[in-house]
């Protein structure tokens, strides 16, 4: 099974866990906002207060209002709220901060999630009827102006949203009990329930790993019926672990059965042959360098030392000059040997200095090093660029393409949920603005922007389109007052895409003798959504490059840098997105494919997918798409892993060979070439240049011997009555380093 499929299943589980956490956090925030914005009158009945507290559009199964002093319910709505283990007095204390949600068992057998909020209710006036049933109103101590109550909402535990044919999703608590499953019917769920040990194992792994920061993973199951089960798990926890969902201990488990990948070619034989060829090349290069460079240099070192001993004052050693100098090798060692033989004969008086002749350029030790480099390159370059290339037709399995499409659909759903939730919250804020004073409206706008970091600007427009109030940054482009509510794209050109959610402000009731409220009240509240927030929404690890495009397939947001309203980076991506366009009256469907990013077959393969943003909801009419493209080489597929290892072997061979030969050129070849030039000048009659050894190796030893020979030649010339005096001349380093 390719590692890419296990990694994709883990990331799909992580996407589903993020979606579950976002949903829980939004529900808890909605309940607290509803409790904070409610302003019940002091004489309101508990049932009336409870109805005003239930959030609009919230999928609450039941709600209850508790008296924290006694823990007894004052009013209830919907199904019975399971309150086992709920300490109302402790939870109602204002010094404990926000109350974290809980997952509890219910009488129906299905678990329920409890959401909490504190409510401050004004106490009835003293002059009210003391005989009124105290159990039926909200009066408490007559010395207090407000009374704190505990608001509890019960809702069904939502199943994780999973995408991809045949994939199942389960939400598991910290004890390994399944709280919700998706899909709820069908053969996929039957297959999921057949692995009863997986939920407990995933919950245990999540609870163990959450302390180390590793909150997701994958498991490979046994194969059956020609398929193998791939399971991913992820903890519902935020990066900082401080949100409402992190303390619930929930784990998302996704699974799918996929066919195992076909067995590829056996690369062991190729590896053995390539390694054997490299060993042979290394031996041949070593023997060539030893026979043509190192061995002649050692013989040259011995010959120069023998001649230096022969010019001493000991008569017995003068016989060393009678032995000729053997000339071995080619290039610089051969030239230096011939120069030494000429110097030996000059010391014996057999000949004079050889006239300087222009030597034709012939291959030397540098050419030998270059040939060795070419031999090593002949092994490394094919591995780096030619061998074990991934065939385009078999590069990516169909399961990996399906996983890319499923993750792209999850990213589109993530954006749609965020936009839809913001639109719902904005509608609640619009209701709070109805009939509010200017100061109260400014407070509502400031609170709404503080609760929604994705809103870069909030402003109110009257019926004429004039801006009445504003908080946050200056709008990129103010919206023309639309009808109703929803989400819209304000501009189609410019440097920054302007995207706005808007909601109609309900008109207050009519007053006698007054004009219609619509003529005087503000018309609409608009929230401009920041593009950087959309960038964060579409960015998902392991999904590659992701773009959010408009109905004309131009980029509105992206996971990497982009220019507003630019086209997609390739025409193939644009054609893939065009396949998701819907027929008139339709919503469109997702599409995926393996695309060639380059011009030649097999070059720059990428796994791409595109998904419509929403089929329903406020963003359904925008025609937006989420597009993703992941380089196939980034996936952990066996073929690409073999290709990467082959390229690494070639790169290491070229690097190691180049480094060794470069070092050889610096410490041997260049000093040897300088030494050869000094020896030839000395043989040609240059007696004035003093030779200073620099290195402590064979080249330095030969240089020291040449200096002794030079001094002996100078003394011989003086003894023979030469006219030229031995005048010291500027020094010349014959084997100096570069």
Image (cartoon, rainbow, N blue to C red):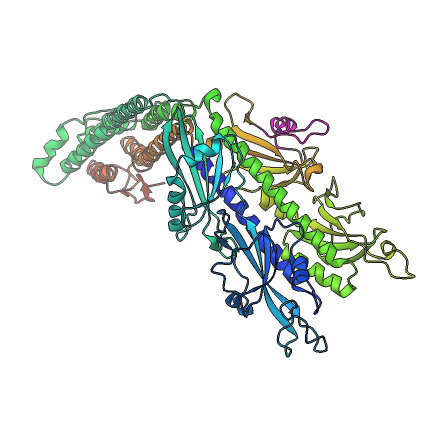
Please state which of residues 320 and 115 is positioned toward the viewer in this rendering.
Answer: 115
Residue furthest left as drawn: 316
Q: Position of residue 549 (x, y in %)?
A: 66, 36
Residue 126, position as x, y percentages in the image: 70, 78
* Residue sitting at x 74%, y 64%: 440
Is 100 situated left or right of 507 in this image?
left
Dominant secondary structure, magenta:
loop
Q: Quadrant of residue 361?
A: top left
The residues colored magenta run 568-591
Report the residue at 45% width, 39% height from top.
10
Q: Is residue 721 visible?
A: no
Q: Nearer the viewer, residue 410 or 156?
A: 156
Residue 482 spot, x, y in % from top left: 80, 45
Looking at the picture, tell me which residue is in the foreground, 490 or 508.
508
Residue 377 versus residue 170 in the image, above or below: above
Report the residue at 41% width, 25% height from top: 261
Q: In the rendered image, is residue 423 in sight?
A: yes
Q: Residue 507 lies in magenta, yes or no?
A: no
Q: Is residue 465 left or right of residue 629?
A: right
Front residue of 251 and 271: 251
Q: Is residue 569 magenta?
A: yes
Res. 473 image quadrant:
bottom right
Say above or below: 663 vs 64: above
């Amino acid at each position: 099974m390719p590692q890419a499929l296990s990694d994709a299943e883990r990331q799909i589980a992580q996407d589903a866990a993020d979606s579950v956490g976002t949903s829980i956090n939004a529900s808890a925030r909605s309940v607290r906002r509803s409790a904070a914005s409610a302003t019940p009158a002091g004489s309101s009945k508990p049932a009336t207060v409870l109805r005003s507290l239930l959030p609009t559009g919230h999928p609450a199964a039941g709600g209850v209002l508790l008296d924290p002093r006694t823990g007894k319910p004052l009013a209830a709505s919907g199904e019975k709220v399971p309150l086992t283990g709920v300490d109302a007095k402790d939870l109602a204390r204002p010094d404990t901060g926000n109350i974290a949600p809980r997952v509890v068992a219910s009488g129906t057998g299905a678990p329920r999630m409890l959401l909490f909020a504190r409510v401050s209710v004004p106490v009835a006036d003293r002059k009210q009827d003391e005989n009124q049933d105290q159990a039926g109103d909200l009066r408490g101590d007559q010395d207090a102006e407000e009374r704190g109550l505990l608001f509890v909402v019960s809702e069904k535990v939502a199943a994780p949203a999973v995408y991809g044919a045949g994939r199942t999703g389960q939400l598991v608590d910290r004890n390994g009990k399944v709280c919700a499953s998706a899909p709820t019917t069908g053969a996929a769920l039957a297959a999921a329930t057949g692995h009863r040990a997986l939920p407990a194992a995933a919950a245990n792994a999540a609870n163990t790993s959450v302390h180390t920061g590793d909150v997701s993973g994958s498991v490979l199951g046994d194969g059956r019926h020609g398929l193998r089960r791939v399971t991913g798990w992820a903890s519902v926890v935020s990066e900082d672990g401080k949100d409402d969902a992190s303390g619930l201990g929930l784990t998302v488990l996704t699974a799918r059965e996929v066919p195992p990948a076909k067995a590829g070619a056996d690369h062991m034989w190729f590896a053995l042959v390539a390694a054997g060829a490299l060993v042979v090349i290394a031996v041949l290069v070593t023997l060539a360098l030893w026979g043509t460079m190192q061995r002649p240099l050692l013989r040259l070192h011995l010959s120069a030392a023998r001649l230096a001993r022969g010019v001493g004052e000991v008569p017995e050693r003068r016989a060393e000059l009678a032995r000729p100098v053997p000339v071995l090798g080619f290039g610089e060692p051969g030239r230096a040997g011939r120069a030494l033989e000429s110097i030996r004969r000059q010391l014996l008086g057999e000949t004079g200095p050889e006239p300087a002749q222009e030597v034709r350029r012939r291959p030397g030790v540098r050419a030998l090093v270059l040939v060795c480099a070419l031999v090593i390159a002949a092994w490394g370059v094919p591995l780096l660029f030619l061998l074990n290339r991934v065939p385009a037709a078999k590069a990516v399995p169909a399961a990996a393409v399906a996983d890319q499409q499923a993750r792209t659909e999850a990213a589109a759903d993530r954006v749609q949920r965020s936009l839809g939730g913001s639109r719902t919250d904005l509608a609640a804020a619009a209701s709070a603005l109805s009939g509010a004073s200017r100061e109260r409206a400014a407070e509502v706008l400031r609170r709404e922007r503080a609760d929604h970091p994705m809103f870069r600007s909030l402003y109110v427009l009257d019926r004429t389109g004039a801006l009445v109030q504003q908080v946050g940054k200056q709008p990129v482009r103010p919206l023309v007052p639309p009808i109703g509510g929803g989400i819209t794209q304000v501009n189609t050109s410019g440097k920054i895409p302007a995207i706005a959610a808007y909601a109609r402000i309900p008109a207050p009731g009519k007053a006698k003798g007054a004009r219609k409220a619509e003529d005087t009240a503000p018309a609409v509240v608009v929230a401009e959504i920041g593009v950087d927030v959309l960038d964060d929404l579409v960015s998902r690890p392991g999904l590659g490059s992701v773009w959010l495009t408009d109905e004309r397939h131009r980029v509105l947001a992206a996971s990497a840098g982009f220019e507003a309203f630019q086209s997609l980076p390739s025409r193939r991506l644009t054609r893939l997105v065009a396949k998701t366009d819907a027929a008139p009256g339709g919503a469109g469907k997702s599409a995926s494919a393996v695309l060639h990013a380059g011009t030649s077959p097999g070059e720059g393969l990428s796994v791409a997918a595109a998904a419509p943003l929403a089929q329903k909801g406020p963003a359904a009419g925008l025609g937006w798409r989420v597009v993703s493209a992941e380089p196939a080489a980034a996936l952990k597929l066996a073929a690409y892993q073999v290709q990467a290892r082959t390229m690494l072997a070639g790169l290491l061979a070229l690097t190691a060979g180049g480094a060794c030969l470069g070092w050889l050129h610096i410490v041997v070849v260049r000093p040897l070439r300088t030494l050869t030039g000094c020896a030839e000048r000395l043989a040609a009659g240059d007696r004035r240049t003093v030779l200073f050894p620099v290195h402590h190796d064979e080249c330095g030893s030969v240089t020291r011997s040449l200096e002794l020979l030079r001094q002996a030649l100078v003394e011989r010339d003086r003894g023979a009555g030469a006219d030229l005096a031995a005048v010291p001349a500027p020094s010349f380093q014959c084997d100096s380093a570069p």
